[in-house]
């Protein structure tokens, strides 16, 4: 099991959930206005994709912080 040395896992989950919730809310609002189910599905898919992208960004940040820790020793 991998340790969370920089304590970013919780922050990453919070940011990812908030980001995807905003995208999903935009999709729902757009669906209520246009009643286009394809638009709703597109935004829900983008919300899922956004969640994964934010998690990947935080993985990259963790790797960068690890490399900074190693270079400082």
Image (cartoon, rainbow, N blue to C red):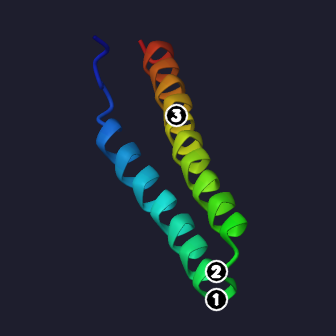
Which quadrant is the N terminus positioned in? top left
Contact? badges 3 and 2 (CB < 8 Å): no
Q: Nearer the viewer, residue 3 or 37?
A: 37
Q: Residue at x 29, y 35 (%)?
A: 7
Contact? badges 1 and 2 (CB < 8 Å): yes
Q: Nearer the viewer, residue 2 or 5?
A: 2
Determine whether the residue tagged by mark 3 lies in a helix, strand or loop: helix
Which quadrant is the C terminus positioned in? top left
Task: Examine the rendered structure and indicate whether residue 30 appears above or below residue 6.
Answer: below
Q: Residue at x 59, y 50 (%)?
A: 50
**Real-space Cα separation, disc 1 to disc 2, in angstroms:** 5 Å
In this rendering, position of residue 34 left or right of residue 19: right
Q: Nearer the viewer, residue 67 or 38?
A: 38
From the image, tell me which residue sits under label 3. Answer: 61
**Real-space Cα separation, disc 3 to disc 2, in angstroms:** 33 Å
From the image, tell me which residue sits under label 2. Answer: 30
Residue 62 point in image, percent of width and height: 46, 29
Determine whether the residue tagged by mark 2 lies in a helix, strand or loop: helix
Residue 38 point in image, percent of width and height: 71, 64
In this rendering, position of residue 21 left or right of residue 48: left
Instruction: Say which mark, if any, is on residue 60.
Output: none
Instruction: Say which mark, if any, is on residue 33.
Output: 1
Q: Of the residues tagged 1 and 3, which is closer to the observer?
A: 1
Residue 11 point in image, percent of width and height: 34, 47
Task: Examine the rendered structure and indicate whether residue 16 appears above or below residue 71.
Answer: below
Q: Residue at x 66, y 69 (%)?
A: 37
Q: Residue at x 54, y 44 (%)?
A: 54
């Amino acid at each position: 099991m991998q340790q969370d040395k920089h304590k970013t896992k919780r922050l990453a989950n919070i940011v990812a959930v908030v980001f995807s919730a905003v995208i999903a809310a935009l999709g729902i609002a757009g669906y209520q206005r246009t009643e286009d189910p394809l638009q709703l599905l597109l935004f829900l898919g983008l919300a899922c994709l956004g969640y994964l992208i934010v998690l990947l960004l935080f993985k990259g940040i963790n790797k960068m912080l690890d490399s900074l820790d190693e270079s400082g020793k």
